[in-house]
Amino acid sequence: MTDTITAPKIHTKERTKRQPPYHVILLDDDDHTYEYVIRMLQELFAHSPETAYLMAVEVDTTGRVIVLTTTKEHAELKRDQIHAYGPDPLSSRGCAGSMSAEIEPAV
């Protein structure tokens, strides 16, 4: 007769490591109209007209506004979409390009 030794079962929990969040930050300039900013925020981020307006006011008064918090890869995409959005056809200053944006870790 042989004795069988059974090892105890070891339960390990797998934890999915979450990516740290990043902010997409729209930077102010004097070349783009409120209408442009509101339209861009609605089209690129699906913000409501009210939210887009409040963000336009904030970027105008403070120089920057967080428009989205997401993963780093998605934040980079949205920043690039802001940079590629194009000039403001309503600007009286002859705006030649898009607004500026940056991303930063959300801490």
Image: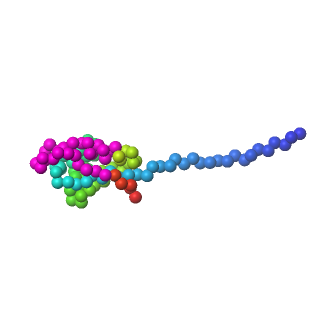
Provide residue 59's location: percent of width, then percent of height: 23, 55
Asked whether 79 falls inside the magenta stretch, the response is: yes
Q: Is residue 61 above or below residue 35?
A: below
Instruction: Judge from the rendering whether residue 23 lies leftward or rightward of residue 43; answer left or right.
Output: right
Q: What residue lies at 25% left-to-right and 50% top-to-bottom?
A: 100
The residue lying furthest to the left in this view is: 92
Start-end of magenta stretch: 77-102
Q: What residue lies at 26% left-to-right and 56% top-to-bottom?
A: 64
Q: Main secondary structure of the magenta part?
A: loop
Q: What residue lies at 20% left-to-right and 45% top-to-bottom?
A: 97
Provide residue 74's location: percent of width, then percent of height: 37, 44
Asked whether 18 falls inside the magenta stretch, the response is: no
- Colour approach in the figure: rainbow
Q: What residue lies at 29% left-to-right and 43% top-to-bottom?
A: 81
The residue lying furthest to the right in this view is: 1
The residue lying furthest to the top in this view is: 1
Provide residue 28's location: percent of width, then percent of height: 22, 54
Provide residue 103's location: percent of width, then percent of height: 34, 52
| Number of numbered markers | 0
Q: Could you tell me if residue 95 is visible in this image? A: yes
Which residue is nearer to you in this view: 57 or 87? Answer: 87
Q: Could you tell me if residue 42 is visible in this image? A: no
Instruction: Judge from the rendering whether residue 58 lies leftward or rightward of residue 93; answer left or right.
Output: right
Quadrant (top left/top right/bottom left/bottom right) for the C terminus: bottom left
The residue lying furthest to the bottom in this view is: 62
Quadrant (top left/top right/bottom left/bottom right) for the N terminus: top right
